[in-house]
Structure formats: structure tokens, C-alpha cells
Image: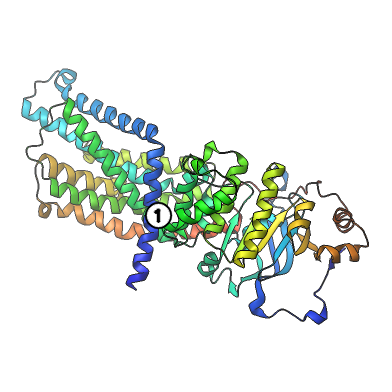
Amino acid sequence: MIARLSGQIGLAYAFVDREVALSKRYWAWELVWIVYGIVTSLSVALIGRAAPVISGQVMDEATLDRFVLYLLVGSIAWRFLGIVFENVTEVIAWERWEGTIEYTFMAPVHRITHLLGMCVSSVIRASVFSTIILATILLFLHVDLSQANALSALVLLAVGSLAFIGLSMGAAVFPMLWTEKGLQMAYIVQAVVLLVSGVYYPVDVLPGWMQALAVISPATYVIHGLRAALVDGAEISALWSDVWPALLIGAISIPLGLRAFLFAERYAKRTGRLKRSG
Amino acid sequence: MALVIERTIDQGPPAASDLALVAKNVVKAFHASGKDEKNKRIRAVDGISLSVLRGEIYGLLGANGSGKSTLIRLFSTLLEADSGQVTIFGYDIRDDEMAVKRLINRVSVEASFFKKLSAMENLVYAGRLYGVAPAQSRLRGTKILERLGIDAKRHDEPLEKLSRGMQQKVAIARAFLTAPTLLLLDEPTTGLDIRSKREVQAFVRELRAEHDATILLTTHDLEEAERLSDRIGIVDRGKLVAEGTVAELLTNANVSTLEEAFMGLTGHKLEDADERSEPHAP
């Protein structure tokens, strides 16, 4: 049993190792995405810094610091969750683009092991990117992290990763079923999650029907909890109201997403879609 | 016209353990891709039955679109048959999919690699998927690549910088690295220059001799089929229209060349592509 488990972990590691090697080879593109992430988050933080000028209202320094951090947490957390979502969602599209999809799906690897490897590499990539983005912004801008509770934030990111992995596995089905348009569909799912999850504003300002969608988006709880941890220094015990819904969504979405993926793989095998070109 | 040459009686039927692959009445149909033919289904594989013996090189000869690549994709677990049964070394391809996957490997007409990774990185990755330790993969990979004429200094270059012929050799090295019991070669030499083609063909024979591998080869190259195969199956419009050794095919068709036999059995030249093929997915 232990030997079997370690064998599967070794197989999953093959995908992590491959992704690391690909990141090294595509270093110029990785640099582009990091710069893009820095610029986006920095721009959002600067909007916060300019709030008194834009609104014509006087704001004291503490309020301004809080507002900047509020926006920054949303921006960087979304970058983290977005990378997890995109990497897992693109698991089919990327292999198709490289031309390796047939080889990967023919290999004697359980799909759950394959996806586990891809999910782990996505979380590693998201963590590295987010850390670099945050560190770079701290060089350019004063950000008040004096109240931040790093442990609570890490727990929330871990829980958020799980919840997003389930969602992404479900969305990865689209490129499997619709060779040409599937990835576009997955990006629309991601865009809707961005809109309704309170990334840059509280969900209370959303129209009623969007607030209903916010309830089922894991990002809503992760970002709300992260703000409480990083802006107000909340302990993990005080964040349970954000942790349990995210955990529940993960507990439902991971098995559902995996099942949908396996179903789509079977369907693709019946209809001849499991190949490098449409 | 169907001409299936049975094994001669004095040889006796092969024991189950001698059979590497058995396909029984396999059917695979696809929806037509044309605008006016959406509801039309085309049988890419139409009731094919064949057996490949352990250690044999079996050549599937057919024009482009005749159904031979669809058949290979079915055997590779990348497609599911509509009906019929396929077993590989006794394992049912659908019920024992993972066991089958451990026994097979495939080289397709297009070398499928992570283009930015080097030949060695691709080999090590492939080796891991089949349970071969990285150090072992590097050792075996180096030997096979050098045997195929790829200089050691090119092993660490990104694959995209290697020629098409070299990429195909790396694909063959990758397949043999995992020591498959059944190797599916789907037009492995298409697009290669004569020299590379000969090198690959010699390597295939050599590896069969040294590693007791069974090889199922698809080709639309008559010379290649004749040079490599112990037995040849001729596929036309999704059906297996004839099967046997080259000598048996010539004798039964009463002709002197394989090309004439092919024309006699199918009614057209090998170069004439069959228009039926798998549709494009939406």
C-alpha cells in the first residue's frame, strides 16, 4: 500500500518536474507574466493611493494605508488563485498545443495522479509569482503590513487552492469537449468569478443576482478571509466563517470536477477528440 | 473482394500465450465532418479482426484514410471502439486499460514532444511516466540516441532545434526506452529522408531481435512493409481485405509485386488517398 502510494507520488512528481523544466525553458514568458502581475497590482495600489485626489475627499494616512492594502490583497490573491485556475484549466489545451496530449493520455498514469501533479505545480507557480509580486511592490510603495497575520493568510491560501482546484478541474472539461472554443469558455468562467467574488470591492455592492453567485464562489471567502488576516490581523480561529465555506466548496467541487474530467475523457475517446488537433 | 490468408494447418492455431494482440470484429464510426453530412456516420474501421503473434512484426498497409491509423489509436487506448473486442496479451483494452498501457508504446507520424525541452529531458520525463528512474533513462536514452546516429552534444538541445528526422528518431528512442512489449508504429518513417528511413528500419529490426518486442506497424510505403514485416494486413475502406506473408499475398493474388497485389485487392493504387478520415472536433 505504502509502496503503491509512493509510486503514485513519484508519478505525480514527473509532472511537477516537467512543469519546472518548461518554466525554465519559457523563462522569457514567465518574466512577462511576472512583470504584468507586478504592473497590474502596482496600478491597483496606486489607484488606492490616489483616492483622496480622485474623490476630492480628505483621508488620513491610516485610512489610506488600509484602503491600499485592501486593494492590494484582492489583486495579489486574485493573481494567486488565477494562476492555479489557469494552469489546471489549461492542462488539456497546453498539451494539445505542444502536441503531446496523446502521449500523456496513453501513459500508464491514473488521471487523478496526473491532475495531482499538475495541481501541485500550479500552486508552486502561483506561490512563487505572488511572492515576487508582493516583494517587488513593497520596494516601490509603502504598504502597512504591521497588523498582518501571515499564518492565517497561508492557511486561507491553502484552503483557497483546494477550492479553486475543484473549480478548475471542472472548467478543464471544456477544452476537452470543445477543441476550438473550450478554453475561451473556461476563461469566461474565470471572468465571472472575478466579477462576483469581491476581489476589488465588497460583495455587498453587487446587484442581488450577482451576490447569489458570490455565495458559491470560493474566491469570495478566501479574499474576505485574507483581508481580515492581512489588514486586521485576524487569528485563524476568527476566520472559521470564511474557512468552512471554502473547504465545503472544495470538498464538493474536487470530486465533482474529477468525475466530470473522467467523464469528458471517456467521451473524448468515444468521439475521437483526444488528439493533438481538432 | 476479401482474401484473408489463414495460417497453414500444420502450424496449428497459436496458443493464447503466443498472441500479442487479438482484435475481433472491431468497428469505429465517426460523424462526417461535411456541412451537409452532419448526421452521416462513416465507418473508419469496419469489422476488422486480426491477430498479431508475440515477437512478430505485423505491417498494416493501406492508403491514407483507409482506417489504419484509427485502428492504431484504438489499440493505443486513445479511442474507444463502438463494438468488437481487443485484447493485448490477454488483457481487455477497455476493462484492463491500465495493464494494457503498461505493455504498449506508440510512435506516431508526428513526433510529439515538448518542443522547448531537450531530447534528454523529454526522455527522462517519458521514462518517469513508465516507472523508469531518471538515471536509468539517461543511460539507456544516451545509448539508443547514439545508436540512432544522434551525436551526444545534441542530446541537450531543445527538440525544436533538431531536424524532423532526428525528432522522429528521438520518438523511437522514447518508445524503446520504456521497453514496451507491444510497440505500435504509426507511419514512423513518413517524411524522413532515405538515409534516416533506412536507419530507423534497421533499428526496428535490431530491437525486435534483441528485446523480444512485438511490433505493429502501419505504413503506406510498400517497400517498408515488405522490408520490415513478417506478415502484412492490407486495409482498405476500414476493412482488412487480405493478410499473410509477402509470398502468400503474391501467390494468392497471382502477381509478382506487392504493388500489384495491393491494386488487385483494393482496386486502386496505394497513393490514392481514401477520403474517409476522422472528423474535426467542434
Q: Quadrant of the C terminus of chain B?
A: top right
Residue A33 drawn above or below residue A12: above
Relative depth, front residue between B237 and B68: B68
Residue at 58% x, 68% y is: B93
Relative depth, front residue between A273 and B96: B96
Residue A72 drawn above or below residue B51: above
Q: Quadrant of the N terminus of chain B?
A: bottom right
Relative depth, front residue between B93 and B41: B93
Colouring method of the image: rainbow
The residue labelled by disc 1 is A14
The x and y percentages for residue B98 are: 50, 67
Find the residue positioned furthest to the right.
B254
Relative depth, front residue between B26 and A13: A13
Q: Going by the image, does B4 lie left or right of A265? A: right
The x and y percentages for residue B244 are: 80, 66
Q: Please say whether residue B10 is visible from this viewpoint.
A: yes
Q: Going by the image, does A99 lie left or right of B136? A: right
Count of marks placed on residues: 1
Q: Amino acid at mark 1?
A: Ala
Mark 1 element type? helix
The x and y percentages for residue B182 are: 61, 65
Q: Please say whether residue B237 is visible from this viewpoint.
A: no
Q: Residues within 10 Å of mark 1 (few under 14, many from 20)?
A: many
The x and y percentages for residue A163 are: 30, 53
Q: Going by the image, does A123 lie left or right of B241? A: left
Residue at 32% x, 50% y is: A164
Q: Going by the image, does A107 lie left or right of B190? A: left
Q: Chain of mark 1?
A: A
